[in-house]
Amino acid sequence: LCCECGQFHLLLDNHLYNFQDEVDDELTCHICLQPLLQPMDTPCGHTYCFKCLENFMREYNFCPMDRKKLSFQQCHKSSLLVRNLLDKLVVFCPFKAECQQTMQRCELEAHLQNRCPGFKKYKSELQRKKNPISKGKEDPPTKVETNTPKDPEVPSGGSSLVAESSAAAVVSLGTAEPGLVNPAFEETEEGESLIQKGNYRTSLVAETTTIEIHREDPEEELGMRIVGGKDTPLGNIVVQEVLQDSVIAADGRIAPGDHILEVNGVNISSVTHSQAVSFLRHPGPVLHLMVLQEKGFSNKTAQQDSTSATNREVIHVTLIKRDRSEPLGIKLIRKTDEAGIFILDLLEGGLAAKNGKLSRNDRVLSINGQDLRQGTPEAAAQIIQTTESRVNFVVLRQPGVQLPDLVEDGSTSNNSSSSSSSNGGSPVHHRRRLDQNHYRRKSTYQKGYLSHEKTVAIKKEPKESLGITIGGGRDNKNKLPIYVTSVQPIGCLFRDGRIKRGDVLLSINGIDLTHLNYYEAVSALKSNAASHSVVLKALEILSVNSAEPSLDIKEQGFSWSPLWITWLGLPSYLHFCQDIVLSKGNLESWGFSIVGGFEESKGNQPFFIKTIVPGTPAFRDRKLKCGDEIVAVNGVPAIGMSNSELIPMLKEQKNKVTLTVVSWPGSLV
């Protein structure tokens, strides 16, 4: 327990305070998003905490806000006026059960040492544990023994990093960049209040489950829609929707948001979207699925969560990449019963395997000095991806320990689904708010698919039908454009051969079809088919990867609809944007995680919803779905933003946020 602020935190971390009033944004550090401590000014006019800026500058040579070139030596202490304003901020005593006093921040240390009954009680209980009187004495706290006593300078807090007695580590972001904590996994911005509730820590619980699905008819649809794949920013295959009265619905164990890891023993966590659809559509009476299911947040006491640390060894490993894009070949996972990140596997031939110093089951404590004890595999993957050369690991190893109840989060050192990027702070205050229905972006970000507009002019007999069936329409649940579901062997379009199943119909004889509902489109097509000539404008979505499986031959018995991934190639003028308003309490997270955004190696990618956590505002609202694309937040377009810019913007929204999203139906399996 820190004697200056009265809260648990690592020795090298900033102090933690419970502020009485909301602190002005001008007095907030845009790295840790907390009121400034030991404020430092940059030449470009921004202010950060001393420790936050020092940690950030160890890895980067630019200002987190405007990315101007910067060195730590150029920075200087803020003015005495600013420091006095910060010191006068009113805080609560952290021992609320015994002391309800408030005081200026600069007075808290003296209050704790001289006047606080709660701190006095804490010290006496601590002394009683150290000097027990009765035979039924309590054991002293377990100390961490390491095999490296000559090297006490462990990044991110040394042996105290391993001890993990601190519940406050949950509320301290512990990273040098604001974007590394995903909104789904950050418990609360006012998280200090959690410390007052019996040292409880909130953690996200997930578990893997093997489910056996039986079908009387081996050809019957499973009845669920899926999104994701290694060829998309989502990475994993995620269940978007379970259809009513389907095989999956009758079984009742799979729910929207579940990640499908294996199908009949085949790992599909690293296959393309089309390949995953092919595996899941394979006929058979019995289907074995391994799924990762988020169970929501659960509370654990620090005592319950900590385990015996004897014989553990802290190891330092440095891997050197030839360039930023080189993968390390490390598979990272989470566990259900313990916070943190663990090494599941080292890929054969990868940089880490060749180095030989990291091992399976190692727990990752920090990477490049950034504390990952409460981190996610996605955050770790992003730190690795954005490092130019040297990647410094600090890992905890306990010989002979296996990983029970593995929870795979699908993150490797070069995973495309990493949840953040290292482009520094959030310049969202300088962005222009746009009032428009369509948020333009290039449709060719999806490398596997390209859209091609074509015009088809046909001469026909007046009584000859077009011979097509259509789907979609703006009255559809997903507000889809009109598309061709089949071309019948009778009719002029089959004879012509240029209109294909899956084509999006834009117009017929100059009549715009893109804003019509289904019945309006049917009427327009029928009335214009009665003429001697028909001119159709259509958009064809082309796969540029010839290695993808042909799904046509595997779709017998399935009601045809385009794959989810093909919708991603549509130009923005065909998107139907809808606003989803979420509300939450002060101590809640929004309850969703995002992937995508601008990265130097990939350019602009859309933001997608990857995870929706049970029991959170996003889950209760029921409108947001996995695979939805976020195009704006409170009217501010997300195009061009990095992940580390959008996440602080979401965290700034206290109780209400408006997400503008485009929702495409997942692929039916």
Image (cartoon, rainbow, N blue to C red):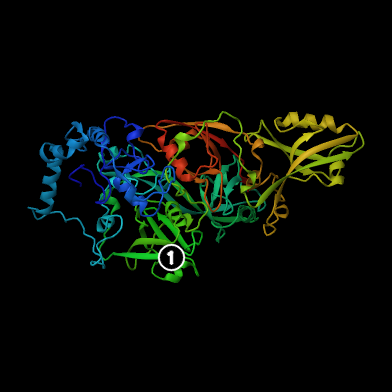
Quarter of the image holding residue 98?
A: top left
Q: How many marks?
A: 1
- Measured as percent of width and height from the top left, residue 181 is found at 40, 46
Given residues 596 and 588, the one toward you in this image is 596
Taking the spot 82% from the left edge, 41% from the top edge, the residue there is 456
Query: From this viewpoint, which residue is outermost toward the left?
Result: 133
- Please give the residue where the numbered disc 1 appears in the rendered image: 320
Given residues 94 and 319, the one toward you in this image is 319
Instruction: Identify residue type, mark 1.
Output: Ile
- Measured as percent of width and height from the top left, residue 225 is found at 60, 45
Q: Secondary structure at mark 1?
A: strand
- Measured as percent of width and height from the top left, residue 416 is found at 53, 53
Q: Is residue 122 visible?
A: yes
Categorize mark 1 by other alpha carbons within 10 Å: few (<14), some (14-19), many (20+).
some
Given residues 106 and 590, the one toward you in this image is 106
Would residue 162 appear left or right of 498 to someone viewing this image? Answer: left
Would you place residue 120 above or below residue 141 in this image?
above
Taking the spot 38% from the left edge, 63% from the top edge, the residue there is 361
Quarter of the image holding residue 83?
A: top left
Would you place residue 27 above or below residue 172 in this image?
above
- Measured as percent of width and height from the top left, residue 16 is found at 26, 42
Query: From this viewpoint, which residue is outermost toward the right?
Result: 461
Would residue 291 appear left or right of 463 to someone viewing this image? Answer: left
Q: Is residue 491 visible?
A: no
